[in-house]
Every structure is written in C-alpha cells, then in structure tokens.
Amino acid sequence: MTKQDNHRQKVVSKLKSLCSNHKQWDAFCEYLDIMISENHKKLEQLDDIASIHQAQGAVKALRQMKYLRDEALSDV
C-alpha cells in the first residue's frame, strides 16, 4: 500500500459516522444531486470546450462521492 492510499484510507475511516447515519447520508446525497443538477444546467448553456470539460469533470467527481459510503463501510 502506498503512502497516498494509506492516507486516503485514514481519511475515509473518519467519515464512517456520516456514512452510517442514514439521515445525514440522505441529506448529503440530496446536496450532491442538487450540485449535479446545477452543473447539468450549466452544461446546457456553455459554449466553450474548456468550460464544458470542467463542468463534466465536476459532475463526474460529484457522482464518485456517492460511492464514498461503499468505500467507508466496506470493512465494517
């Protein structure tokens, strides 16, 4: 395991309380959905390729955050 992987694992373990609390997790996912929706609206209005790629990357990152629960609770 690399130093970076070890650090990531430590940080993810600190987020277990968020991931295991159903109310908090649902609120977090709702927030992510709002942010994804805002970026989709932005994508519809953008006309330069750099901004389009930036918004697409933001949507991808936000969607990946939804898998945090799986990662944090995988060893429970």
Image: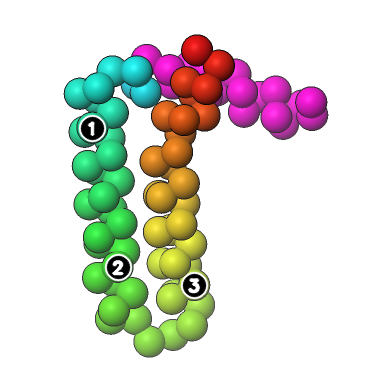
Residue 9 relative to residue 45: left or right = right
Q: Residues within 10 Å of mark 2 (few under 14, many from 20)?
A: some
Quadrant assignment for the N terminus: top right
The tag earlier along the polypeptide, 1 or 2, is: 1
In this figure, what is the number of numbered marks? 3
Dominant SS in magenta: helix
Identify the secondary structure beneath mark 2. helix
Q: Which mark is residue 53?
A: 3
Q: Point out the stretch of residues depicted in magenta.
A: 1-17
Q: What's the amino acid at mark 3?
A: His
The tag earlier along the polypeptide, 3 or 1, is: 1
Residue 75 vs residue 16, the one in the foreground:
75
Q: Residue at x 46, y 57 (%)?
A: 60
CA–CA distance between discs 2 and 3?
12 Å
Q: Position of residue 44 (x, y in %)?
A: 29, 79
Q: What's the amino acid at mark 2?
A: His
Identify the secondary structure beneath mark 1. helix
Residue 24 vs residue 46, the one in the foreground:
24
Q: Position of residue 35 (x, y in %)?
A: 28, 53
Work out which residue is located at the far bottom of the displayed protein and give it: 47
Residue indicated by mark 1: 26
CA–CA distance between discs 3 and 1?
28 Å
Residue indicated by mark 2: 40
Q: Any magenta on residue 70?
A: no
